Image: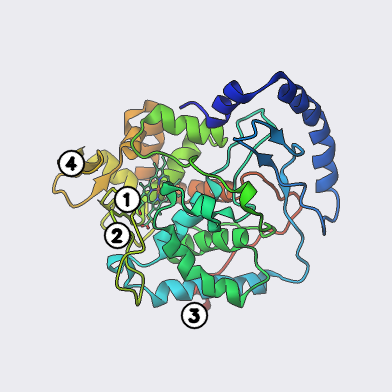
Amino acid sequence: MSSIAFNIAKSNFSKRSLYTLAGLTTLAGVISYNNSNTNNKNNNGGPNKFSNSSKVLASAATLNVALNDDKHDLKDYQQVYNDIAQKIREYDEYDEAIGFGPALVRLAWHLSGTFVGPKGCPHFSGGSYGGTIRLPKEAKDPANNALENARWLLDPIKSKYSWISYGDLYTLSGVTAIQELGGPKIKWRPGRKDLGEEYASNSVLPDASRDADYVRGLFVRRMGFTDQETVALIGAHALGSCHIQAPILPGAKESTGPGSGYTGRWTASPNFFTNEFFRLLLEDKWTQKKWSGPVQYQNSDDSLMMLPADLALVEDPAFKKFVQEYAKDQDKYFKDFAAAFQKLLELGIDFKGKREFEFKTLDEQDI
Ligand code: HEM
């Protein structure tokens, strides 16, 4: 798949929508310029709507402009960070003692990775702005199986800090998890605004059974990352595991539902953020697992796993170059991951001129 958006464009563009698009493109420059220069208390730049069904690319062609929130500062967001971090600590036995950290990283990524906005096309959909992964249309996307558990952890925090939007809370939870699990500091900006179901996405998240061309189509052509950023981001698979069934929530008796159908961990330390994923990709021997489930790969002693889309990173020479670099140099990996993860969380949002926060870990605060 080269790009979902391009496919839609090919099949659904009537001449009229093309002309409308041309008009909006011109208008877009003006609107986005104006939005980024106003104190946008009551505007959000008109969230972009990308309707698959109506075959119309609707609304103005601008980025969603981050809102100003003069009432809350670093101290308030650090408090939210701390509460999320405490929850990760409290439930450290969850999911065979991996804890909730990896699930929160996946939640932030699946909220943001719905972005569809090929280079040069002013129209886009998805991204983290509207916090739409909480809504049935997006929550029920099979790619989001098991993420109800991550949202379960965050619900009480949303009730306590009702002023924070879901998009801000979910992206902040990804940042919190990366930092608390020993990863790099990630700069984060608030200003997302809850949007309704008409802005929710479905069926745009990656299919793990695919190859390097597909991965590049999705990350580079559709979301606008470089090869290097793509490799850095997928290195987050150092964390967590694959699930046939969603892990059982604390206090519950049964799983909340199906997982991805894959099974196993990528690394032996799934609750520490490291460059292990890259080292293992290069140094272990990966063979196809013999089982009745989907095609996946196992290492020499069958203790760890890789998805076909993970192995694509060493099958493709341009991707492999970065795998080799990151396997050798964890500092470089951390630096590149931090930048790419911030970019992921901000896809489709205009944060121009907005405050940028960096949080202390609980350890740094002696909590
Ligand atoms: C080609 C791209 C990708 C594919 C095909 C993919 C696929 C998957 C699959 C199938 C799972 C298992 C889900 C489950 O069974 O619970 C998973 C888990 C995970 N993914 Fe990805 N992923 C991709 C990219 C990313 C990126 C860019 C990030 C973060 C920046 C990420 C972070 C994670 C994490 C942390 C988990 C573990 C979740 C847990 O343990 O609950 N993935 N991914």
Nearer to me, 222 or 268: 222
Compared to residue 80, the image places residue 338 above or below, namely above
In the image, which is nearer the foreground, mark 3 or mark 2? 2
Residue at the (68%, 34%) spot, across then down = 123
Q: How many angstroms separate mark 1 from mark 4 (CA)?
A: 21 Å
| Amino acid type assigned to the residue bearing label 1 in the image | Glu
Q: Return the disc, 1 or 3, that comes first in the chain's sequence.
A: 1
Residue at the (52%, 70%) spot, across then down = 155
Q: Secondary structure at mark 3?
A: loop
Q: Return the disc, 4 or 2, that comes first in the chain's sequence.
A: 2
Q: Return the disc, 3 or 2, that comes first in the chain's sequence.
A: 2
Where, by quadrant of the figure, is residue 186 drawn? bottom right
Colour option used: rainbow
| Amino acid type assigned to the residue bearing label 3 in the image | Asp
Residue at the (60%, 62%) spot, across then down = 166
| Amino acid type assigned to the residue bearing label 2 in the image | Ser
**Mark 4 = which residue?**
289
**Mark 1 = which residue?**
276
Q: Residues within 10 Å of mark 2 (few under 14, many from 20)?
A: some
In the image, which is nearer the foreground, mark 4 or mark 2? 4
- Indicate which disc residue 269 carries: 2
Q: Secondary structure at mark 4?
A: loop
Nearer to me, 17 or 334: 17
**Mark 3 = which residue?**
366
Where, by quadrant of the figure, is residue 93 drawn? bottom left
Where, by quadrant of the figure, is residue 245 drawn? bottom left
